């Protein structure tokens, strides 16, 4: 049987460890409000939608130990396809990077780090494709996610589908940080 002082030391030890837990891996944006509405800047230009089709500024903090690279995805799970809609996939962002500028997702962008690769979105090209839910549908949730990965590079190219990128991300993820905005038309 442990003495009272040994039990107290164990309790203090557990409390001290909890007080020094690592800060959360977080994603923020100057352009996209978490829980709010997307603006015309992030709306697709085409398919009946009229927006700027511009990827937002994104920043992340406190990646977990062991992170060797990052990836970014934009996904709409409510698209009426049976499998959602991949609006944007970017992989092979160096572990030293903590933000990307607005407009980085344009086709052929030179704003992303040189090692970054944009996969093919469900509009059919490599780059950012903004929100464009069916007219009259409920507001769709647009999930912006930064993935901390255990590998420095994924074998992805500009023709890789969102499903392929998603498979590779789930196989290599350490942690995810996410913000969700909504849009309806």
Image (tube, rainbow, N blue to C red):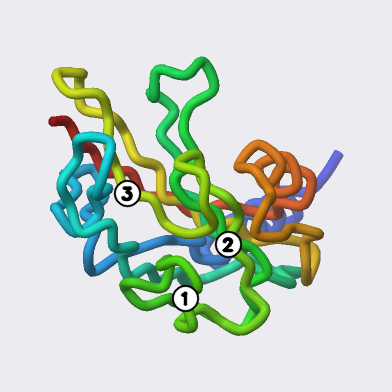
**Quarter placement of the N terminus:** top right
| Disc 1 secondary structure class | loop
Spot occupied by residue 150 in the image (x, y as percentages of width and height): 78, 62
Q: Earlier in the sequence, mark 2 or mark 1?
A: 1
For residue 185, side relative to residue 65 (left or right): left
Spot occupied by residue 79 in the image (x, y as percentages of width and height): 39, 24
Spot occupied by residue 7 in the image (x, y as percentages of width and height): 71, 49
Identify the disc placed on residue 120.
Answer: none
Q: Are marks 2 and 3 in contact (CB under 8 Å)?
A: no
Which residue is rendered at x = 78% and y = 61% of the image? 154
Residue in front for this viewpoint, 138 or 17: 138
Which residue is rendered at x = 54% and y = 22% of the image? 83
Cα distance between the residues tagged 2 and 3: 14 Å
| Residue receiving disc 2 | 118
Cα distance between the residues tagged 1 and 3: 16 Å
Which residue is rendered at x = 52% and y = 70% of the image? 62
Q: Residues within 10 Å of mark 2 (few under 14, many from 20)?
A: many
| Residue receiving disc 1 | 109
Q: Are marks 2 and 1 in contact (CB under 8 Å)?
A: yes
| Disc 3 secondary structure class | loop
In the displayed structure, 69 sits above or below 138; it is below
Q: Earlier in the sequence, mark 1 or mark 3?
A: 1
Cα distance between the residues tagged 2 and 1: 9 Å
Identify the disc placed on residue 130.
Answer: 3
Please identify the quarter of the rendering in which residue 33 is found: bottom left
Please identify the quarter of the rendering in which residue 14 is found: bottom right
For residue 81, side relative to residue 42 (left or right): right
Spot occupied by residue 161 in the image (x, y as percentages of width and height): 64, 43
């Amino acid at each position: 049987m442990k003495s009272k002082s040994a039990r107290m030391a164990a309790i203090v030890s557990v409390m001290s460890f909890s007080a020094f837990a690592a800060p959360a891996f977080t994603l923020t944006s100057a352009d996209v409000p978490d829980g709010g509405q997307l603006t015309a800047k992030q709306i697709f230009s085409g398919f009946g939608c009229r927006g700027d089709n511009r990827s937002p500024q994104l920043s992340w903090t406190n990646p977990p130990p062991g992170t060797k690279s990052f990836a970014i995805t934009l996904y709409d799970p409510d698209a009426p396809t049976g499998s959602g809609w991949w609006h944007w996939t970017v992989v092979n962002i160096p572990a030293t990077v903590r933000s990307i500028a607005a407009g980085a997702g344009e086709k052929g962008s030179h704003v992303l780090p040189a090692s970054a690769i944009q996969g093919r979105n469900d509009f059919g090209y490599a780059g950012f494709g903004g929100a464009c839910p069916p007219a009259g549908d409920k507001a769709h949730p647009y999930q912006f996610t930064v993935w901390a990965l255990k590998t420095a590079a994924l074998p992805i190219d500009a023709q890789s589908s969102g499903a392929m990128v998603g498979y590779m991300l789930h196989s290599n993820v350490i942690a995810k940080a996410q913000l969700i905005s909504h849009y309806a038309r």
